[in-house]
């Protein structure tokens, strides 16, 4: 791929690759000074399912990949429980660099990474976004409510279905959330079955009262009498 190749000639996957490279060299906020590696995201493009977490942690910062620590192992287990593999989904975070000591993201940091996340949503074109934790919820569904109230619910925004769940890291620190997280992923499975179900096959053409599938031949020179008087027949043309 030529560096000078116009964007409109690139596929979404190629444009996403460029976006990843931009993230790797980003200096839009102060986190670039303390990171080991930026963590753009991983997964197929396009992807029907996208997962958005909060920010990279220690292991993610070392490896440059999202969810490779203990929280990532729990996420893999939860995905496997609903018949998915990591390779089936695109995974990223609100922040692309690790905050020092894994502190909460600052508003200016989330704002600086905001354009990257917006472009990822456009390029990956997910049908369903699984939102991990309160910080991702606040970014993707501002004003929707605390995660303790809305987790497990599906919300339609801009033609994309969003489902907020507790962050796996929160469940690792608070074992009382594990059952809720598992139940949320069971709901995610039901939503996926509904949203990603193939469309029903088209109905066969309706025939006349004798079971014939074709309308009578139309005389040359103009519409048949039935075309003039029967709107239902018109719908079959």
Image (cartoon, grey):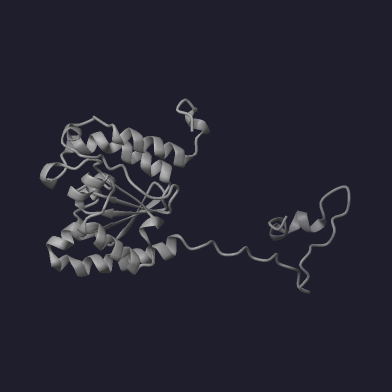
Q: Please, is residue 178 above or below residue 92 in the view?
A: below
The extreme top residue here reads: 4
Closest to the observer, 113 or 140: 113
Closest to the observer, 125 or 81: 81
**Picture quadrant where residue 28 is located:** top left
Q: Position of residue 37 (x, y in %)?
A: 24, 40
Q: Residue at x 56, y 64 (%)?
A: 200
Q: Position of residue 203 (x, y in %)?
A: 64, 65
Q: Position of residue 14 (x, y in %)?
A: 45, 38
Q: Quadrant location of the C terminus?
A: bottom right
The extreme bottom residue here reads: 210
Q: Please, is residue 210 above or below residue 188 in the view?
A: below
Q: Residue at x 27, y 60 (%)?
A: 75
Closest to the observer, 216 or 192: 192
Q: Is residue 138 visible?
A: no
Q: Please, is residue 177 above or below residue 44 in the view?
A: below
Left or right: residue 229 versus residue 61 is: right
User: How many numbered circles does the render carry?
Assistant: 0
Q: Please, is residue 226 above or below residue 37 in the view?
A: below
Q: Position of residue 81 (x, y in %)?
A: 33, 69
Q: Residue at x 60, y 64 (%)?
A: 201
Left or right: residue 28 versus residue 224 is: left
């Amino acid at each position: 791929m030529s560096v000078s190749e116009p964007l409109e000639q690139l596929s979404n996957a190629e444009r996403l690759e460029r976006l990843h490279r931009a993230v790797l060299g980003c200096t839009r906020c102060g986190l670039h000074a303390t990171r080991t590696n930026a963590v753009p995201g991983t997964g197929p493009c396009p992807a029907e399912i996208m997962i958005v977490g909060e920010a990279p942690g220690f292991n993610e910062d070392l490896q440059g990949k999202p969810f490779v620590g203990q929280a990532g192992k729990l996420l893999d287990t939860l995905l496997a429980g609903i018949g998915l593999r990591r390779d089936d989904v695109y995974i990223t975070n609100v922040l692309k660099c690790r905050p020092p000591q894994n502190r909460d993201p600052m508003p200016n940091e989330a704002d600086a990474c905001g354009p990257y996340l917006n472009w990822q949503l456009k390029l990956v074109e997910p049908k369903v976004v699984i939102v991990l934790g309160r910080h991702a919820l606040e970014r993707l569904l501002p004003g929707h409510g605390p995660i303790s109230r809305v987790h497990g619910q599906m919300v339609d925004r801009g033609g994309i279905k969003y489902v907020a769940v507790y962050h796996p890291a929160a469940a690792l620190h608070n074992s009382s959330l594990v059952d809720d997280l598992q139940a949320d992923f069971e709901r995610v499975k039901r939503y996926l079955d509904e949203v990603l179900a193939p469309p029903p096959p088209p109905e066969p053409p309706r025939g006349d009262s004798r079971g014939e599938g074709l309308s009578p031949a139309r005389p040359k020179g103009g519409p048949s009498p039935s075309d003039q008087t029967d709107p239902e027949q018109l719908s079959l043309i």
